[in-house]
Image (spheres, rainbow, N blue to C red):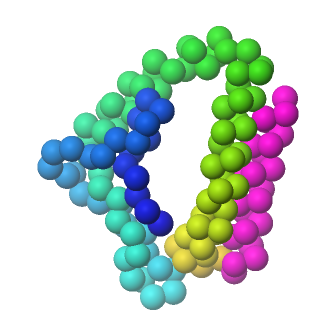
Amino acid sequence: MKHRGDLIDGRFVRARGDGDGALEARDADSGEVFASYPIRRESVHEALEAARRAAPRWGESDAEQRAAGFKRLEAQLRNRADELARAITREVGLPAWEAHAEVAQALGRAAVEASA
C-alpha cells in the first residue's frame, strides 16, 4: 500500500526531519515487512493540533456538511476497496472474502452517515 504521508489538516504531508522510527506492516504468514511508515513525533503533534482546531468546526457544522464529508470518505473507501482488502488480508491474515467484508462494512457505515 502506497504511503502518501500523514493526513494533517486535510492534506497529505510528507514527514520532515529525522525519524523517530517506523511502523512496519508485516505479512501475517511469512512475517516479511511489506510496508513501512515513518513515525515522526512532530507529525503526531501537528496532527493533534489540527484535530483540536477542527473539532469545533465539525461540531458546529450542519448535517448536510457532515454528510458531505462522509460521502467523500465513502468515495475514497470505494476507490481503494480492493487495495484495502489486500492489505488487511496480508497483514491480519484474514481470508480475502472476509477482508472484503470488513471493507464493505466500513463502506456501509460511511454510506449511512452520508445519508443522515
Classify residue 116 by image quadrant: top right
**Would residue 11 be counted in the magenta stretch?**
no
Which residue shows up at 60% across the image and 64% down it?
Answer: 84
Q: Is residue 7 left or right of residue 36?
A: right
Classify residue 72 by image quadrant: top right
Rendered position, 69 above or below 110: above
Q: Position of residue 61 (x, y in %)?
A: 67, 15
**Would residue 109 be counted in the magenta stretch?**
yes
Q: Is residue 59 left or right of residue 112?
A: left
Q: Position of residue 114 (x, y in %)?
A: 78, 35
Q: What range of the chain is rendered magenta?
A: 95-116
Rendered position, 105 above or below 7: below
Task: Determine the residue located farthest toward the bottom in the rendered image.
Answer: 30
Q: Position of residue 36 (x, y in %)?
A: 35, 65
Q: Is residue 24 left or right of residue 65?
A: left
Which residue shows up at 29% across the image and 60% down it?
Answer: 22
Rendered position, 4 above or below 66: below
Q: Say whether residue 92 is visible.
A: no
Prevailing secondary structure of the magenta residues: helix
Q: Say whether residue 17 is visible.
A: yes
